[in-house]
Image (spheres, rainbow, N blue to C red):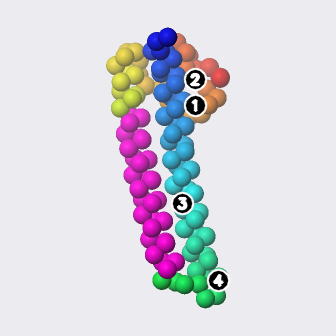
Amino acid sequence: MAMTLAAATARLTRDINSSEDQIAKAVAAVGETVNALSLAQIDVPGAPKAEAHGAMLRLLSAQRKIAAAQSEMLRAHHQLSKIGETMTGEEPWCPSDPLTSARIDGESVAA
């Protein structure tokens, strides 16, 4: 069964917003790990500072790469919005909470 434009729009809206949220959570999770490592370096006597610093640099590199992925996701979101505008003739609309709201025939509805 072929996907309709309405179904594709709904699925992409849900999935792109979910992906953006997951990436943001990954950025935050790495930040929490960096924070824990920083505190451990201060609070744990005899902690190997040079080795911990190396791990810190790797964590920060990972966080930077995840943030770059977040930028790419936002660019993709923008491109998909433009495609939607071209396909439907309507201005793009993104729900504040894609899991609990939607737009059908130009009207906002609760999911």
- Please tell me which residue lies in front, 19 or 3: 3
Residue annotated with mark 4: 44
Task: State yes or no: discs 4 and 1 in contact (Cβ < 8 Å).
Answer: no
Query: Is residue 76 placed above or below 48 in the rendered structure?
Result: above
Mark 3 or 1, closer to the camera: 3
Residue annotated with mark 2: 102
Name the kind of residue labelled 4 in the image: Val
Name the kind of residue labelled 1 in the image: Pro
Mark 4 or 1, closer to the camera: 4
Q: Which residues are magenta?
A: 51-78
Q: Label 2's element?
A: strand
Q: Residue furthest bottom?
A: 46
Task: State yes or no: discs 2 and 1 in contact (Cβ < 8 Å).
Answer: yes
Q: Is residue 4 visible?
A: no
Q: Is residue 68 magenta?
A: yes
Q: Label 2 to label 1, Cα distance in Å?
A: 7 Å
- Which secondary structure class fits the magenta region best? helix
Task: State yes or no: discs 3 and 2 in contact (Cβ < 8 Å).
Answer: no
Q: Label 3's element?
A: helix
Q: Label 3 to label 2, Cα distance in Å?
A: 32 Å
Q: Is residue 37 left or right of residue 58?
A: right
**Residue 77: image x %, image y %?**
41, 35
Residue annotated with mark 3: 30
Which residue: 47% across, 15% down?
Answer: 3
Q: Residue furthest front?
A: 1
Query: Is residue 91 placed above or below 35 in the rendered structure?
Result: above
Name the kind of residue labelled 2 in the image: Ala
First in sequence: mark 3 vs mark 4: 3
Q: Label 4's element?
A: loop
**Residue 11: image x %, image y %?**
52, 25
Q: Which mark is residue 98?
A: 1
Query: Is residue 42 placed above or below 102 in the rendered structure?
Result: below
